Image (tube, rainbow, N blue to C red):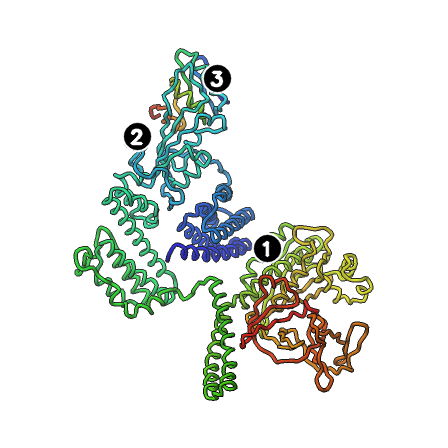
Amino acid sequence: MGIRYLKKHAALEDIVTVEDAETLLDWLKKQKKPAVNLGRCQHLHAAVLQVLLAVRPAIVGDVPDPWLRKALGCPEA
Amino acid sequence: MNQTELLDQFILEARDCLEQAGQRLLEVEKNPDDKERLNDLFRMVHTLKGNCGLFEFKALETVVHAGEDLLDRVRNGTLGYNDVIADALLEAMDFTAQMVDEIEKTGQIAVEAAPRSQALSSRLRALLEPGATVSTPRAPVSAPAAPLPEAATASPLPSPEPVPPWVDALPPDWRSSPSTAVAWRYSPEPECFFKGEDPWLLARQVPGLLHLKSGTQAPWADLSTLDCYRCNLAFAGISSAPVAYLHEHFRYVPEQVEFFELSNLPDKAAATSMQATVGSPANAAMSSAEVADTATASPDERAQAVRELIFLRTLQIWEDQLIILGRPSPQPGVIQACRLAFKNLLHTLQELELPVSLQAQSSLAAINSVGALVSWAQTHRPSLDHPVASADTVSAAGGGPLTPDNSRRGGGGADDGAGHNKVLKVGQEKIDRLMDLIGEMVVAKNALPYLAQRAESVFQQRELAREIKAQYAVINRIAEDMQHAIMQVRMMPVGTVFQRFGRLVRDISKKLGKDVQLVVEGEDTEADKNVIEALADPLIHILRNSLDHGIELPEVRRAAGKPEQGTIKVVAHQESDRVFIEISDDGAGVNPTRVRDKAVERGLIPADKAATLSDAEAVQLIFLPGFSTAESISDLSGRGVGMDVVRTAVERINGHVDLQSTQGKGTRIRLSLPLSMAVTNVMIIEAGNRRFGVPMDLIVETVRVHADDIHHFKQARTTVLRGRIVPLRALHDLLALDESPLTNEDGEHAVLVVRLGSENVGLLVDHFHGATDIILKPLEGVLSGLTGFAGTALMGDGGVLMILNPKELV
C-alpha cells in the first residue's frame, strides 16, 4: 500500500519501501506539525525509518511492531 | 587424546553413523511406521550432531541439527514420513558425507560450504512447518531459551579485550542479559540503500534478539539539506544467539558489524556464566571460547570462571557415565571404562581443589559390578555447595595432595588397557602397514634356509645349519600365525559394499520410473578388505545395468505377465577359499540376437563368427570392450564401458565373471572372488634361463609334449591333449627372448596349460620349478605401464621373481 498522505498525517501502511522515503521527507518538510500514523505498518524500510528519526514527526496511533516502537522512542503501548 | 586423534575418531565415527543412517533411512522409507528403526535413525543423527558440536564445523552442525529436528518430529508422530522428507534427508546426508571427506582432507570446512549448508538446513526446516515458512519477528519476550553450545574460536571476536567503548555505552539494563549473550553493533555504510540493503530489516531480524537500539552515526543534518538516501543509521543490540549465527546473519556486511560477548564483561564473566549454566549440565559445554577469553582478564575472577566451567564439565561427564551404565547389559569393559573415567574425574576435582573423599577413592577401586558403580557414582556425585559428606574429607589445597593413582599403579597397565572398549577402531592404513611388514617378515624368514644351506656347504657347519633350520621352523610357524591373524583383521563383511546399493537402486529406479525391489542375502560373508573394495565399482556397474537394461518398465512387465515390481537379488556366499556373489534380476534378459548384431555392427567380431556362436556364447559378447546395446547414451549406461570394465576389475583381483541370461526371464551374473589376495600361490617356471611365476589358479595342468606331437600350421602351433586341440605359444616368443624352447633328453617340450577365459592355451617353457607362496607386489612407477606382468615378488634368496599375467601376454 505504501503511504497515504492525509490532511493531518501521513498513513504508512503495510510495507513502506525505499522509494517512499523521499516523498515522505518532502511531505513532512512541508507540514507545520508533521505527523505519521504507523498503526497498520508492517514494515518500513530503513531509509524511511531514517526520515522519521531525522524529522521526528508526531506519531499518531500506536505502533504494532515492538522493535519499531522502541526505535522511534514511543512510550509502551 | 590430542586434537588430531579426536578428529580422526570423529571422522571414523561420522562415517559409521552416516553409513548406518543411510541404511536406516531406506529401511524407514519402506516401513514408515517402524518406531524402532526411526528411533535408531534419530539416535544416529543425534550422535552425529553431538560429535559435530565437539568441533567448529558450523556448516556441518547446522545441517545435521536441522535433520535431527525433522527426525524428531517424525519420531514423535507429529510429522508424517514421506518421499520429500526422505529426499531432503538423503541429500543432507550426502552433503554431510562430503563435508566429512573434506574435513578428513583439509581438517576443516571451506567457507564456501556455508551457504549450501544454510540452504539445506532451511530446506529441512521448511519441511518442519509446511504452513509457516516465514518466521515472524521475535518479540523481546520470547527470546530463545537455551542457546546452542557454541565454540567461537573459528570466528574470533573482533575486539575481545578490552571492553570497547560502544559496549560501555549500551544501556545499563541490557547488562542483565545472560552472559552467553552477544552485544553487536551495526553501522551500515552510507551508500547501503543503493545496494538494495535494508539495515533496519537486518537489524530487526537478528537471531535471538533481546534488545535493539537505533541511533545515528553522525548528528542529523539540517532538514533542508538532509539526504534521505544516505544512511546515517546505526544499530546496536543484544542477542542470545551464538556468535556464529550472528556472523551468518550479517554475512553480507561483515565489515560493518562488531560483536562483543557479554561473558567478557569483567563484572559478568564469573558470576553469570555460572548462573546460566548451572543446573543443566548439557549447557556446561557452553564454550571453550569462554575459557579462552576469560583467561586474559582480571586473573582471580577469570580463574574462578574457568574452575567453574571445568567443574560443570566434570559434572556432565559424571552424568554421562551414569547414562552409559544405565544402558541395558553393559559389557565388562564398559564398567572398567566408567570406573576409570570416575577415577580421572575425581582427580580433576582434586586439581580444582575441591574436597574429595578418600573413601570414595578407595571404594571405587573395589567396585566390580554395574549396580555398585551406579550407586557409588550417585552417592559421590560432586557438588559445589555440598562437599561430599564424609568424615575423612580432605581438602587437597591444605592437606597433602592425594596421589590417587598410587594404590593402583602397580596393576594399572592392565587395568587401563582393559578399560577401553573391546572393539578397536583402527585406520586402514595401519592394518595395511602391518600387512606390508608381515610380507617383509615372510621374505626375511625365507632367507634362513638359504643361510642354513650356506652354513653347511660353504662353511661346513652342519651343526649350525641344523640349528638355523630349527630356528627357522619356529619363526616360520609364528610368521604364519601372524599372517593368518592379520588376514583375519583385514576381513570385512561384503555387506559394507552392499549397503550403498539400497540407495543406488532407490535413486535410479525412481529416475527411470521403474519399480524395483532389492533383495540382499549373505551380507555377512567375509572377504579381504582389498577384494571388497575392488568389488564396489563393478557391482555398481552391474546393478546399474540391471536397472537400466534388465528390469522393464512396469507396463511392459505387466504385459509380460510378471509382477510390476522387479526384483534384483544380490546374494553372497563362501565356498572353500572363494567368495561368490550373484546378482540376478527378473528382467528382460539379454537378447542374444541383438547382441550378435550389435557386436558385428560395432566391428567387435566378424559376422561369420557371430553366426556360429551359440546363444549362451553370444551373450558373453557383452563383455567385449566397447560393447553397448543401448540405442542412446544415458547417464546411467550406454557408453560401452560397462561389462568390459566389470570383467577387467574383477579379473584384476583374480576373480571370474560368469553371466547367464534367459531372454524374458532375467539375467544372472556370478562373480567368483578369492578370499584374500595377500598371498598368491604361484608356480615357478623357467624360460631362457630366467625364472617366472605364473599364478596357480590359472594353471590347468603341466604336461610334456613330444616335439613330434606339435603340429605346425604357418606360424601357429597346436597339439592335441585329451582329444582337444590346444593352441601352443612359446613363452620365449611372447617375451621376445632370444632362446628357443628347450626339450629334455626325450625330445619333449614342457607345456604349461593355462586357462584364459573359457579357452585353454599351452605355453612352451624350459623347466618347471614347483610352487611357492609369494606376496605379490604390483608394478609401480615407470613399470606400472608394463603389460604381461602381474607384479613382482621377493624370493627368500633375495632374488626378484616376475609374475606373469598370461591373460595380457597371450
Q: Quadrant of the C terminus of chain B?
A: bottom right
Which residue is at a point 64% across and 71% down the rendered structure image? B804
Q: CA distance from mark 2 to mark 3?
A: 34 Å
How far is the residue under mark 3 from the one under mark 1? Answer: 60 Å
Residue B209 picture location, percent across and down: 38, 35
Q: Nearer the viewer, mark 1 or mark 2?
A: 2
Q: Position of residue B6 (x, y in %)?
A: 40, 56
Nearest the viewer among B587 and B34 is B587
Q: In terms of secondary structure, where does tag 1 sit?
A: helix
Q: Which residue is mark 2?
A: B169
- Three-letter code for the amino acid on which mark 3 is drawn: Thr
Q: Is residue B720 left or right of residue A31?
A: right
User: Is label 2 in contact with label 3 (beta carbons under 8 Å)?
Assistant: no
In the rendered image, the quadrant that contains the N terminus of chain B is bottom left
Image quadrant assignment for residue B341: bottom left
Q: Residue at x 77, y 75 (%)?
A: B717
Provide the residue designation for mark 3: A23
